[in-house]
């Protein structure tokens, strides 16, 4: 049985689902190129999808594009381009990079700007249920109305406040009843896109976009939801609160979060500019080399990018390709399956391929389960 760590339950537990697995993964805010951290996140859900398909499930994965948000608008203004032109160009580059890395196509890749009517309807439902309020031209979610606030992150209030300040939550907003309340709809600043609403012209907040897209494309409850660990709070905590307030049903059955990738000990971040871009790396190595380098790190542990990882991965790939094919393929495949079923232990799965190569066994099918084409 496939067992996965669940962020909300803080334990490795069996993953159980019906024939169709509904998966929602937070994509990118497309204002810069795909970096290694993005690749690590995408590859986590790709390997998970491949194993679920191997187990006989249909995987219906939705990966959103946040094409209206503060960082994108600021970058477009800095470059002097329309925000949707910037979003389109960077989304196309992101898609090319993931295709090169052999990431399976997703069922849909909805954009926030394509769901404004749905978002307005969702916000109306929050207000109608007594979980939101209007103040200063904005609409806020009132966290005091949601008894299970904190069920995803398990953070204390001080930690929540610190992370909200760091990650755009604006706890000092004087219009809020509580500093942890979050924006559902806000007035647009001069030069920013705006849509009409019954609360006045403006644009949606970040968190409401994902709740709306997930429920529109997958229904009120998704089997797997995730993104980077930096999204646990406030993004996924807020998503859960507003979604369950509207539907009265569990929003997510299993939370799976991807690790942070660092450079020189500091987390890769667009705001810091310490990024290693996938497109730059692919000018020097085969895409499968980068895939192997990333999969040699378990998804639950943050890790540091170094150039030596590519050299090691390339040597490993050569070793696999040079191995014999004298049977043993099914045993190797079962070995990789066992590793993946144990909380997606991709480093152990790669070690199974090493052992098969040393023994001259067929490892093509096992490698393919990891998305590695020999």
Image: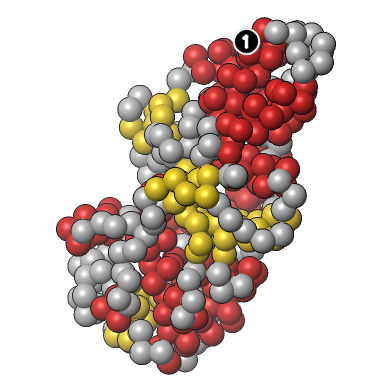
Q: Which residue is mark 1?
A: 315
Colouring used for the render? secondary structure
Q: Does the rendering let one see residue 181?
A: yes
Element class at badge 1 = helix
Q: Is residue 200 visible?
A: no
Q: Is residue 200 left or right of residue 44?
A: left
Which percent across, then down, holds residue 255?
47, 55
Crowding around mark 1 (Cα neighbors within 10 Å: few <14, some 14 to 19, many 20+) is few
- The residue located at (53%, 32%) in the rendering is 345
Please report the residue visible at 50 percent of the width from the left and 45 percent of the height from the top: 4
Residue 183, relative to residue 334: is it above or below?
below
In the depicted view, which residue is nearer to us: 255 or 192? 255
Which one is in front, 61 or 206? 61
Rendered location of residue 272, percent (x, y): 36, 39
- Camera-nearest residue between 213 and 148: 148
Q: Quadrant of the N terminus?
A: top right
Answer above or below: position of 154 versus 285.
below
User: Which quarter of the figure has residue 352?
Assistant: top right
Residue 284 higher or lower than 98, as above or below: above
Residue 94 falls in image quadrant: top right
**Which residue is painted at 22% across and 80% down in the image?**
177
Q: Is residue 147 left or right of residue 20?
A: left
Question: How many numbered tags mark residues here?
Answer: 1
Q: Position of residue 161 (x, y in %)?
A: 22, 60
Residue 158 quadrant: bottom left
Q: Residue at x 41, y 89 (%)?
A: 129
Q: Where the C terminus falls, by quadrant?
A: top right
* Residue at the left extreme of this rendering: 158
On screen, residue 32 above or below 150: above
Image spot of residue 198 (x, y percent): 47, 91
């Amino acid at each position: 049985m496939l067992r996965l760590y669940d962020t909300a339950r803080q334990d490795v537990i069996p993953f159980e689902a019906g024939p169709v697995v509904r998966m929602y993964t937070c994509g990118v805010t497309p204002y810069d190129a795909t970096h290694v951290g993005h690749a690590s996140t995408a590859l986590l859900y790709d390997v998970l999808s491949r194993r679920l398909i191997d187990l006989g499930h249909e995987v219906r994965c939705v990966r959103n594009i946040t094409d209206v948000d503060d960082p994108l608008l600021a970058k477009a203004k800095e470059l002097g381009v329309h925000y949707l032109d910037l979003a389109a160009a960077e989304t196309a580059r992101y898609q090319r990079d993931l295709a090169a890395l052999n990431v399976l196509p997703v069922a849909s890749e909805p954009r926030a700007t394509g769901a404004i009517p749905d978002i307005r309807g969702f916000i109306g439902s929050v207000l109608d249920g007594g979980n939101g309020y209007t103040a200063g031209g904005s609409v806020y979610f009132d966290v005091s109305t949601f008894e299970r606030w904190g069920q995803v992150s398990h953070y204390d209030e001080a930690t929540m406040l610190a992370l909200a300040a760091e990650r755009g939550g604006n706890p000092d907003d004087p219009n809020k009843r509580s500093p942890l309340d979050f924006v559902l709809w806000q007035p647009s600043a001069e030069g920013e896109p705006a849509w009409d609403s019954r609360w006045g012209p403006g644009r949606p907040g970040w968190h409401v976009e994902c709740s709306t897209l997930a429920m529109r494309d997958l229904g009120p409850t998704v089997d797997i939801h995730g993104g980077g660990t930096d999204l646990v709070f406030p993004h996924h905590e807020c998503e859960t609160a507003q979604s369950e307030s509207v539907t009265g049903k569990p929003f997510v059955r299993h939370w799976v979060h991807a690790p942070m990738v660092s450079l020189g000990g500091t987390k890769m971040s667009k705001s810091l500019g310490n990024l290693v871009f996938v497109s730059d790396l692919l000018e020097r190595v085969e895409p499968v080399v980068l895939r192997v380098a990333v999969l040699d790190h378990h998804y639950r542990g943050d890790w540091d990018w170094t150039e030596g990882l590519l050299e090691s991965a390339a040597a490993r790939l050569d070793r696999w390709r040079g191995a014999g094919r004298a049977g043993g393929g099914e045993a190797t495949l079962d070995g990789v399956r066992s590793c993946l079923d144990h909380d997606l232990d991709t480093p152990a799965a790669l070690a199974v391929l090493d052992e098969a190569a040393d023994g001259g066994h067929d490892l093509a099918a096992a490698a393919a389960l990891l998305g590695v084409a020999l």
